[in-house]
């Protein structure tokens, strides 16, 4: 596994330097009169001492809480207007679109001993990175032990840490956080449309996957789809050359045997390393992927602003009838950092009550891009390949 420095581009003092940058990003919170919580229920599955009960300076010992957050969003609410296809989602008897996501929360046992700051990390494809980056711990998606606390940097300073699922297409396994998002339909009828996938092979091969590892992706409507296209180019901005449809198919090689497969492409002449291949094909049943961004927004909103859910179950970050966090910070690396940029671009950091859910953001090694996070047939675990360019 790569070292912390090689994976983040940060030096040995990176936790201290990055946290200073994060805190410097705090801005003024928008004040609003009333609360409209889109998290309607918190379901706690496990609650246990963190790090074998170890103490971390003035903050003392920590608790690990995990479970699911259950969301209910109003498609007619202006705060949700940017969520693509939300109006086409299944609604309950109240006219709301519901879904659920995993969460993990690490908080001081005694909230009064913490620093009253909530640090939310946008996980990267279901995997957690904040403890590796800030605390120099090993990479682990299920932090429970003293080893997972690393050097204790965040805990000694009293932060509460939160992670939630947001990528619909992340496969379960290895502790990856999950979210189950609803499917958009046209008055109950299935929706079909084009999906594009880009892939590069490391060595010559006649079959290759076009759905990334640990990703479910969208399968083609039909393996024989005559309108599916496969193109090749030698550079990101290079001209595409189309490979004739009778020279490739949705299949993989098992030895000398060709097996139909909705996740692989077989090419008679083989795929060359270093070239960029794009397959475009019709798929069906798009998830309402922008709800993943709303899940981040509303999870932070619940833990920061609410004392309990609609059923009266307490917010674990609230006591004495008041939420503990005085400020919330958000952090992301690479793709996860682009998620934050995307949320800011579409104002999906402002909840249904008009409150800015986080005050500061550390957008680490994101570049200038956004991502495949809020459009029809979006696939969050991979780099976007734009159908309209083909």
Image (cartoon, rainbow, N blue to C red):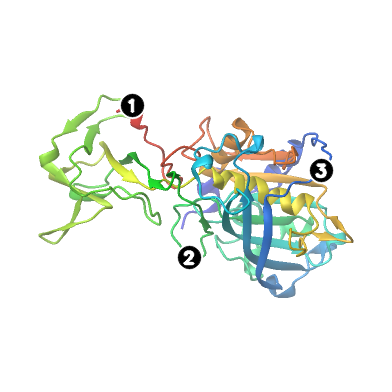
Residue picked out by circle 2: 174
Q: Secondary structure at mark 2?
A: loop
Residues at marks 3 and 1, CA–CA distance in whole angstroms: 45 Å
Left/right of residue 350 with respect to residue 233 in the rendered view: right
The one of 343 and 306 positioned closer to us in this rendering:
306
> Dot 2, how many residues are within 10 Å of its Cα: few (below 14), some (14-19), or many (20+)?
few
Q: Residue at x 74, y 54 (%)?
A: 303
Q: Find the residue positioned furthest to the right.
A: 320
The answer to whether any part of residue 13 appears in the image is no
Q: Nearer the viewer, mark 2 or mark 3?
A: 3
Image location of residue 163, percent across then percent down:
63, 55
**42 relative to 215 in the view: left or right:** right
Spatial CA distance of label 2 from label 3 is 40 Å
Q: Which mark is residue 34?
A: 3
**Few, some or many C-alpha atoms within 10 Å of disc 1 (few <14, some 14-19, many ≥20)?**
few
Could you tell me residue 342's position as x and y percent? 57, 35
Q: Is residue 336 above or below residue 67?
A: above
Which residue position holds label 1?
389
Please say if the residues under marks 3 and 1 sit with CB atoms less than 8 Å apart. Answer: no
Is tag 3's residue or tag 1's residue first in the polypeptide sequence?
A: 3
Q: Nearer the viewer, mark 2 or mark 1?
A: 1
Front one among 149 and 330: 330
Res. 387 visible in picture: yes
Report if the CB atoms under discs 2 and 3 are less than 8 Å apart.
Answer: no
Disc nearer the start of the sequence (2/3): 3
Q: Could you say whether the residue bearing mark 1 is in a helix, strand or loop?
A: helix
Quadrant where the image shows the C terminus: top left
The residue at 76%/55% (across/down) is 159
């Amino acid at each position: 596994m790569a070292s912390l420095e090689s994976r983040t581009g940060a030096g040995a003092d990176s936790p201290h330097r990055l946290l200073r940058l994060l805190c410097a990003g705090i801005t003024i919170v928008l004040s609003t009169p009333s609360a409209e919580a889109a998290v309607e229920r918190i379901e706690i599955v496990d609650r246990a001492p963190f790090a074998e009960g170890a103490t971390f300076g003035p903050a003392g010992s920590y608790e690990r809480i995990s479970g699911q957050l259950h969301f209910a969003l109003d498609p007619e609410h202006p705060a949700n207007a940017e969520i693509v296809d939300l109006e086409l989602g299944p609604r309950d008897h109240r006219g709301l679109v519901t879904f659920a996501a995993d969460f993990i929360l690490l908080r001081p046992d005694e909230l009064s001993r913490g620093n009253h700051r909530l640090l939310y990390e946008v996980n990267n494809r279901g995997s957690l990175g904040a403890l590796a980056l800030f605390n120099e711990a090993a990479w682990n998606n299920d932090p429970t032990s003293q080893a997972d606390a690393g050097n204790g940097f965040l805990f000694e300073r009293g932060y509460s840490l939160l992670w939630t699922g947001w990528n619909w297409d992340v496969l379960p396994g290895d502790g990856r956080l999950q979210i189950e998002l609803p499917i958009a339909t046209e008055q109950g009828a299935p929706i079909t449309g084009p999906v594009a996938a880009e892939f590069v092979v490391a060595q010559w091969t006649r079959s290759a996957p076009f759905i990334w590892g640990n990703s479910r992706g969208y399968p083609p409507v039909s393996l024989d789809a005559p309108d599916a296209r496969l193109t090749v180019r030698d550079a990101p901005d290079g001209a595409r050359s189309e490979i004739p449809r009778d020279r490739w198919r949705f299949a993989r090689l098992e030895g000398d045997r060709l097996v139909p497969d909705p996740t692989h492409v077989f090419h008679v002449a083989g795929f060359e390393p270093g070239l960029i291949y794009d397959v475009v094909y019709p798929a069906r049943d798009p998830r309402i992927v922008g709800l993943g961004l709303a899940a981040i927004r509303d999870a932070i909103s619940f833990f920061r602003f609410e004392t309990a859910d609609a059923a009266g179950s307490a917010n674990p970050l609230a006591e004495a009838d008041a939420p503990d966090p005085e400020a919330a910070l958000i952090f992301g690396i690479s793709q996860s950092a682009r998620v934050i940029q995307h949320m800011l671009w579409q104002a999906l950091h402002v909840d249904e009550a008009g409150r800015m859910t986080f005050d500061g953001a550390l957008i680490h090694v994101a570049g200038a891009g956004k991502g495949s996070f809020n459009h029809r047939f979006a696939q969050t675990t991979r780099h976007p390949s734009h159908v309209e360019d083909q």
